[in-house]
């Protein structure tokens, strides 16, 4: 008859209709106690431990469900088959929202009672409230500053304390007027976060991410001031980067009340030195296999063997090279282990199957998976299969998925609630699903063994490790003893790490392709920028995401060029994005599921050409795909060099030209390795593009025109070119004619 959860679902950015707001009020502040009650309820009261009674009043739920914290760039759009679920407001289930208000004083508890006009009464509780107060003492800020940078303001340190101990620490770092602050993981809003307010929590913001991100890190570089900072924590953190006070970067971080210590590392040096020091402590970036640098292709509607082979064969017939195909819609979407339509015996204990256990109907979706992979390998194409770290609970009570669920629960293989019950996904994607606990060695072995036949026998080369943002709740329990407040952000890292463990066991030089992550993720390549529309705004945000990810150690990164969701991009956007993707660590296109409606929304160059009627699409895309093939030796050599030096493969210009203030006026220009400067065209209708070339000798890669920097160049911007400049003298891994004249020939 009533629902009240003091913590709610613990959505990072949204208050629920039946929670306490805020969960931990400050002493002296007013807070809300929200309750959901059946329509028959005519009265709701809150009774405190001292006997005080506070009546609740009905409230408009649309007023209460307002996002809080850093907002996304815009409300989630209506395009895309997941958009409605992602943007849905919490459902009242026909119940009424009641709200009582109180002022936080001393520690107390309360009960909530709902009554009907017929005299029925239900009471829930007691629920404890421990008001918090900011104090100058309470815990320990363990600052390690071997370079004597001295940016911490000791007088700024304060602790948010309750009777059970400190819950947060706040402190300030000094910012010089000319300091630019970059990092915080993958960020879509800006390269320089100076003047911004943001936080670091792993979150799935479906499209238009704004300040939110799948892949945050509590790490940043103060460019121009010679230092960087790493908060050594996996808990949530917040940053006011000179927004309130331009001379201060104000940090807040959650701490464990039982052990309120926050280690803070201050690194001295230029950006590469700082990043190298950070990665040496948290897990160095790992160089992926060479084939990763070849062109990738995928589409979520390629859900049969015939369709996958048809698309790859079409690309090769169009003389458009393919290095990797990602097959998303291959599985039963129950176990994420078996090919759809396959027949096989159910293993009651969830034990792994071998290829011989499966019967693949000749008229089924995947009549011969191994034969398909063999054909693709013979054509030089590597294969990745899609994964998600969830087991759905809404697929019925029989079959392998039901057996897997029983096994996970009985053996304790899932992430758990504080009371021992299995945690059920609270997010909008696969709601209610169980999450495997990758800190449990037995659970990890069980999970991986089920996928081993895909590597050992089918012959796939890696996995697209989607998801990873699903654990919500401070009080979740992991097998290693950690709670949700410390373990949730690490879930995505452990997820990818487990699959790399499987690669090692199988002797496969494979990759994961992840969108979520946290500190430690650079050791498990590769990553992509997640879900986005096909808009110029999203294109610009993707470039920013790649550069901020790189500045945080994610060196091997890509994106769904020109977006994957909604209506197809126009020919101009598609080709501008393809040109940029040609000159980033991973070049790939992908499209969202569209219920197989016509016309197709695939992002293949032939579909874009057909849909737009623009006969330039195929030859120009072909040119960039072939150009990408010629770049592979350079990218391989530069990848190894970047990992050793701490200078990302795709990197903002401050890594190479940190003393040149003019580079900040061109935040989407970047170096690709040591020798190529890339200036993507990011505005529609551009016929010329302004490029800044820092100090040095430069040659236009497409025209051979020479320039001596620093200089601004107003370059022509035809669709079949991208402003790319070769720094001279050039690397011997670049094609010979480029090194001599800096000219890409028409045949490339």
Image (spheres, rainbow, N blue to C red):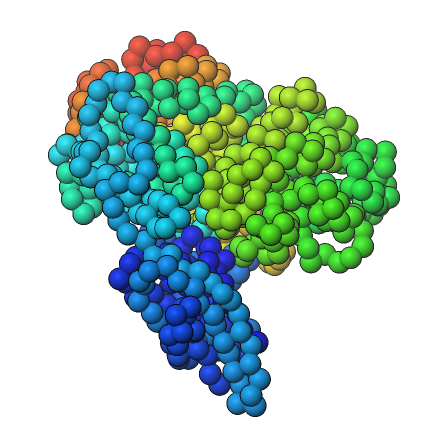
Establish if 80 lies above or below 354. Answer: below
Task: Tell which of 110 and 400 is nearer to you.
Answer: 110
Q: Position of residue 319 (x, y in %)?
A: 57, 30
Q: Residue at x 68, y 22 (%)?
A: 505
Dividing the picture into quadrants, the one containing residue 441 is top right
Q: Position of residue 206 (x, y in %)?
A: 47, 52
Dividing the picture into quadrants, the one containing residue 686 is top left
The N terminus sits in image quarter: bottom right
Q: Residue at x 54, y 42 (%)?
A: 468
Residue placed furthest toward the left: 177
Q: Position of residue 205 (x, y in %)?
A: 45, 51
Establish if 317 lies above or below 733. Answer: below
Number of labels in the image equals 0
Residue placed furthest toward the front: 50
Q: In the drawing, does residue 706 fall left or right of residue 536?
A: left
**Could you tell me if residue 563 is visible in this image?**
no
Q: In the drawing, does residue 704 fall left or right of residue 358?
A: left
Task: Tell which of 321 and 661 is nearer to you.
Answer: 661
Task: Tell which of 629 and 473 is nearer to you.
Answer: 473
Establish if 64 lies above or below 316. Answer: below
Dividing the picture into quadrants, the one containing residue 61 is bottom left
Q: Position of residue 226 (x, y in %)?
A: 22, 23
Q: Residue at x 41, y 19 (%)?
A: 280
Q: In the drawing, does residue 227 fall left or right of residue 373?
A: left
Q: Residue at x 40, y 55 (%)?
A: 13
Task: Tell which of 458 and 10 is nearer to you.
Answer: 10
**Could you tell me if residue 387 is visible in this image?**
yes
């Amino acid at each position: 008859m009533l629902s009240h959860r003091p913590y709610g679902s613990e959505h990072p950015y949204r208050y629920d209709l039946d929670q306490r707001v805020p969960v931990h009020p400050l002493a002296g502040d007013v807070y809300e106690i929200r309750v959901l009650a059946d329509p028959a309820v005519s009265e709701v009261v809150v009774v405190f431990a001292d006997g005080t009674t506070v009546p609740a009043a009905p409230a408009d739920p649309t007023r209460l469900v307002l996002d809080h914290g850093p907002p996304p760039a815009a409300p989630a759009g209506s395009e895309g088959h997941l958009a409605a679920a992602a943007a849905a407001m919490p459902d009242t289930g026909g119940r009424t929202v009641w709200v009582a208000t109180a002022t936080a004083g001393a520690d107390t508890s309360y009960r909530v009672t709902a009554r009907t006009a017929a005299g029925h009464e239900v009471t829930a509780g007691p629920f404890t409230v421990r008001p918090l107060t900011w104090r100058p003492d309470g815990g320990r800020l363990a600052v390690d500053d071997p370079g004597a940078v001295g940016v911490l303001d000791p007088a700024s340190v304060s602790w948010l304390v309750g009777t059970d101990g400190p819950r947060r620490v706040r402190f300030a770092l000094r910012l010089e007027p000319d300091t630019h602050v970059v990092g915080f993981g993958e960020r879509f809003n800006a390269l320089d976060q100076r003047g911004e307010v943001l936080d670091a929590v792993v979150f799935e913001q479906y499209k238009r991410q704004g300040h939110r991100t799948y892949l945050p890190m509590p790490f940043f570089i103060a460019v121009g001031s010679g230092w960087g900072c790493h908060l050594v924590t996996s808990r949530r953190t917040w940053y006011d980067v000179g927004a309130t006070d331009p001379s201060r970067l104000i940090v807040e971080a959650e701490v464990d009340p039982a052990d309120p210590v926050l280690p803070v590392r201050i690194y001295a040096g230029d950006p590469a030195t700082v990043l190298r020091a950070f990665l040496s402590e948290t897990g160095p970036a790992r160089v992926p296999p060479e084939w990763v640098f070849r062109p990738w292709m995928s589409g979520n509607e390629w859900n049969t063997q015939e369709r996958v082979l048809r698309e790859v064969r079409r690309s090769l017939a169009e003389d458009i090279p393919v290095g990797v195909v990602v097959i998303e819609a291959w599985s039963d979407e129950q176990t994420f282990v078996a090919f759809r339509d396959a027949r096989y015996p159910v293993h009651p204990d969830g034990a792994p199957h071998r290829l011989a256990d499966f019967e693949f109907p000749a008229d089924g979706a995947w009549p011969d998976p191994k034969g398909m992979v063999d054909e693709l390998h013979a054509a030089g194409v590597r294969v990745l299969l899609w994964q998600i770290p969830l087991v759905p609970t809404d697929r019925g009570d029989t079959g392998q998925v039901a057996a897997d669920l029983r096994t996970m629960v009985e053996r304790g293989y899932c992430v758990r609630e504080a009371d021992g019950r299995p945690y059920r996904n609270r997010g909008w994607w696969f709601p209610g699903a169980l999450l495997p606990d990758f800190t449990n060695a037995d659970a990890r072995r069980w999970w991986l063994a089920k996928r081993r036949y895909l590597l050992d026998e089918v012959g796939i080369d890696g996995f697209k490790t989607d998801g990873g943002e699903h654990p919500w709740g401070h009080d979740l329990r992991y097998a290693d003893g950690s709670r949700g407040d410390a373990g949730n952000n690490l879930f995505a890292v452990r997820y990818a790490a487990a699959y790399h463990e499987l690669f090692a066991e199988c002797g496969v030089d494979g990759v994961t392709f992840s969108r979520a992550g946290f500190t430690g993720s650079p050791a498990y390549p590769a990553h992509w920028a997640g879900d986005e529309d096909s808009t110029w705004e999203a294109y610009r945000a993707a470039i920013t995401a790649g550069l901020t990810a790189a500045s945080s150690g994610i060196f091997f990164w890509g994106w769904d060029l020109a977006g994957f969701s909604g209506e197809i991009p126009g020919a101009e956007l598609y080709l501008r994005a393809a040109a940029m993707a040609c000159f980033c660590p991973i070049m790939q296109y992908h499209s969202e599921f569209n219920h197989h409606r016509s016309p197709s929304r695939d992002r293949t160059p032939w579909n874009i050409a057909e849909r737009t009627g623009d006969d330039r699409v195929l030859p120009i895309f072909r040119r960039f795909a072939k150009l990408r093939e010629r770049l592979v030796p350079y990218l391989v050599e530069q990848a190894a060099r970047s990992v050793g030096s701490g200078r990302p493969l795709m990197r903002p210009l401050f890594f190479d030209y940190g003393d040149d203030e003019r580079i900040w006026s061109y935040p989407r220009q970047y170096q690709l390795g040591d020798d190529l400067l890339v200036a993507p065209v990011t505005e529609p209708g551009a016929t010329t593009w302004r490029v800044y070339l820092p100090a040095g000798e430069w040659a236009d890669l497409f025209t051979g025109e020479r320039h001596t920097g620093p200089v601004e160049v107003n370059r022509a911007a035809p669709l079949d070119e991208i402003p790319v400049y070769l720094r001279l003298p050039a690397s011997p891994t670049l094609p010979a004619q480029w090194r001599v004249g800096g000219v890409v020939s028409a045949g490339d």
